């Protein structure tokens, strides 16, 4: 950040929060004893992030989720999402198939943090630690963002499941053999191979993630799902036309997720263009609106930390700053039980019903 940008940012932050609070938002977040007390006892699970990932041909675009920050916050578990469409994301400047490149990323986490005991591999929801006191080990939910890695072959679902993967985002940056991405929607929705993949995932115990999926792809998934699904990282779009929503989810789309018993997870993305979502208070107010429209039990947290969001809620640096969301939710009138449901309780229920 240049000096002038920094000063502009400081002025904006100061106006929004008052001078003493604003200064606390610069540098690396450090939790105070009262911050720790505020999140103590909450079940926090991040449904989508890329902490400390192995980079193939792409630069790390932010450091908003790391094992260090996860542990300091006391997060019980976090999704560790490998990129399933590396070939397209790097415009072919990589050697190997998406399947191979995804395996490399998953193996990196297995060798680096799972085998050394720094995280506990979440094979079933019961692997998620109940308490996050001193010396606890956070759970890692291995996931694949982009069903491109399946190459349209449902047997690969079993293969990834055997490698510890418990969640697959069907589509990512572009449409693939399974279905259409929001970015490249032409009105074809879920393909026959996509149907087979969804069926196999729900038989095997792999959670279906519809983040990035076009409205029609989501609708088709909703029609065939026998288990709850998740939209792991998004926020509500204020207009009903999908073509004007970019990466955001329409209310109709969120209702489809809710009807499966699933969860729509929201992230710390700052957004003044499509919705007024600039402060922690705006984020909390949005959760209140979602509670009214789709029900408290269908809302969760998915930060996309490490995924390169174009901008953050003012003052958000990494997952440790979720303490400010907890404060904002309290101010908005949410009960402790509701805050815990949003932060991880609802996603835990979906995991239990999907992966066992
Ligand atoms: Zn994503």
Image: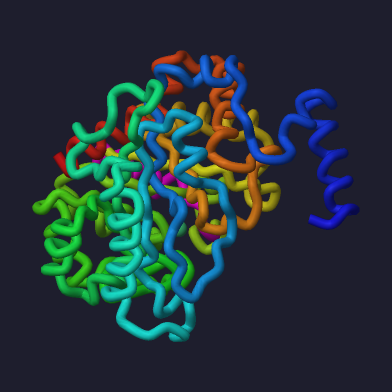
Residue at left offset 48%, top offset 50%: 304
Please tell me which residue lies in front, 290 or 66: 66
Q: How is the image coloured?
A: rainbow
Residue 70: tell me if it is visible: yes
Residue 255 colored in magenta in the image? yes
Residue at left offset 49%, top offset 30%: 73
Residue 179: tell me if it is visible: no
Q: Is residue 121 above or below residue 162?
A: above
| x, y percent for residue 133 | 38, 21
Q: Is residue 340 above or below residue 167?
A: above
Q: Is residue 119 above or below residue 33?
A: below
| x, y percent for residue 258 | 32, 39
- Rendering quarter of residue 98: bottom left
Residue 181 colored in magenta in the image? no
Rendered-image quadrant of the C terminus:
top left
Rendered-image quadrant of the N terminus:
bottom right
| x, y percent for residue 186 | 41, 74
Q: Which residues are magenta?
A: 246-261
Residue at left offset 27%, top offset 33%: 128
């Amino acid at each position: 950040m240049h000096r002038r940008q920094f000063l502009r940012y400081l002025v904006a932050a100061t106006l929004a929060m008052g001078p003493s609070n604003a200064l606390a938002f610069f540098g690396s977040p450090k939790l105070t004893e009262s911050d720790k007390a505020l999140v103590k006892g909450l079940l926090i699970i991040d449904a989508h992030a890329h902490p400390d990932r192995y980079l193939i041909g792409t630069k790390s675009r932010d450091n908003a989720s790391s094992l260090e920050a996860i542990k300091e916050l006391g997060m019980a578990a976090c999704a560790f999402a490998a990129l399933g469409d590396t070939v397209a994301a790097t415009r072919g400047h990589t050697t190997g198939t998406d399947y191979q490149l995804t395996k490399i990323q998953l193996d990196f986490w297995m060798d680096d943090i799972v085998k050394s005991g720094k995280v506990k591999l979440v094979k079933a929801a019961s692997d998620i630690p109940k308490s996050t006191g001193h010396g606890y080990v956070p759970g890692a939910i291995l996931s694949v963002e982009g069903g491109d890695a399946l190459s349209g072959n449902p047997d690969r679902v079993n293969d990834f499941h055997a490698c510890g993967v418990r969640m697959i985002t069907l589509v990512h940056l572009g449409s693939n053999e399974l279905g259409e991405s929001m970015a490249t929607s032409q009105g074809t929705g879920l393909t026959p191979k996509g149907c087979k993949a969804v069926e196999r995932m729900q038989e095997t115990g792999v959670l279906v993630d519809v983040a990035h999926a076009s409205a029609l792809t989501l609708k088709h998934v909703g029609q065939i799902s026998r288990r709850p699904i998740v939209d792991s990282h998004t926020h509500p779009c204020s207009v009903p036309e999908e073509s004007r929503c970019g990466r955001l989810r329409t209310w109709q789309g969120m209702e489809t997720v809710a009807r499966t018993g699933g969860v729509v997870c929201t992230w710390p993305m700052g957004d003044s263009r499509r919705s007024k979502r600039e402060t922690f208070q705006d984020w909390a107010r949005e959760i209140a609106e979602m509670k009214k429209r789709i029900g408290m039990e269908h809302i969760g947290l998915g930060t996309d930390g490490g995924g390169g969001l174009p901008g953050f809620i003012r003052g958000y640096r990494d997952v440790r700053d979720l303490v400010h969301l907890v404060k904002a939710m309290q101010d908005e009138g949410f009960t402790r039980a509701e805050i815990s449901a949003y932060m991880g309780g609802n996603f835990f229920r979906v995991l239990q019903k999907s992966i066992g």
